[in-house]
Image (tube, rainbow, N blue to C red):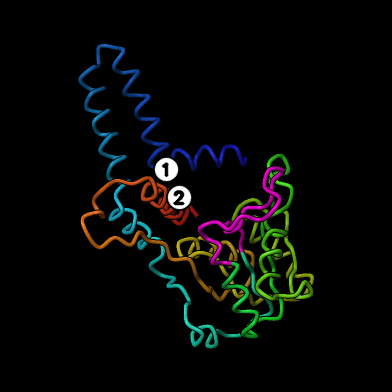
Amino acid sequence: MLVFSALLTALISPLGSALALGLAALLLGLTQWRKTALVLGLAVFGWLVVWSLPITANWIQAHVSRDHAPVVSEEQIAAIPKAGAIVLLGGGVSPPTEARPWPDLAEASDRVWQAARLWHAGRAPLIVASGGHDPATHTQSEAEAMRTVLRAFGVPDSAIVLEARSRNTRQNATDSAATLAERNIRRVLLVTSASHMARSVSHFRAVGLEVVPVATDSESIDYADLRRFIPTASALDLSARALKEWVGQIVW
């Protein structure tokens, strides 16, 4: 199931779809459909260029994040209603490997900082760190890696509960709900990236939890000049992640 999900995600991405269509154009070029192959090849090139533009990446990222503005100021944190627990979703910290025996802070590591801020502000007494791992590639779960970073932000072990089995957002919700049910907790502050929040809220509400979204990690490429129209690898990556969330919001 995870392999199928990974393949589907690859095909959704601009690069994956471009490679698949590019292969189709190549195969057509080996037949009598050479003009069709040329047209398809040019279309694939244009498709890849469009999604590699910072202006396009910023647009699609803003679209998937539009309903969940990041909580930034201390005043906003203090205004958030209290809950039984903070649920911190994985995806922001890469767990240790044999070659790298420490957690690696990724683009979305703001999530861990946001959860620590909420705990220090007294918004909830507990943080549920949710995220598993592939034992073939990592020596620790995402939940354990996030606990390491939470400790660095001053959160004690007594305030951290690990949910270290889940491998995707749906499992984050079901496994976290089971962990919370053991403690009779139904209301949670859900912490994840702004672009990931809409899909996450749907999954968590579907398992019967009362969810207060606390978004963070609003991504953009901050060019205000003509560089917005120059293709970059970082823009292509940002577009791919936003498209994944957009499709996820539609199919859920």
Q: Is residue 152 above or below residue 55?
A: below
| Residue 30 within the magenta-colored segment of the rendering | no
Q: Position of residue 54 (x, y in %)?
A: 31, 53
> Residue at 29% of width from left, 40% of height from top?
47
Region in magenta: 89-111
Q: Residue at x 37, y 24 (%)?
A: 23
| Whether label 1 touches label 2, CB < 8 Å | yes
Find residue 244 and name its label. Answer: 2
Give the prevailing secondary structure in the magenta stretch. loop
Residue marked by disc 1: 13
**Left-right relation of 48 to 177:** left
Label 2, secondary structure: give it: helix
Q: Earlier in the sequence, mark 1 or mark 2?
A: 1
Amino acid at the residue labelled 1: Ser
Q: Separation of disc 1 and disc 2 at Cα?
A: 7 Å
Q: Work out which quarter of the rendered image holds the N terminus and state it.
A: top right
The answer to whether 58 is drawn above or below residue 34 in the figure is: below
Determine the image quadrant of residue 222: bottom left
Residue 106 covered by magenta stretch? yes
Q: Position of residue 121 (x, y in %)?
A: 61, 85
- Which is more toward the observer, 83 or 193? 193
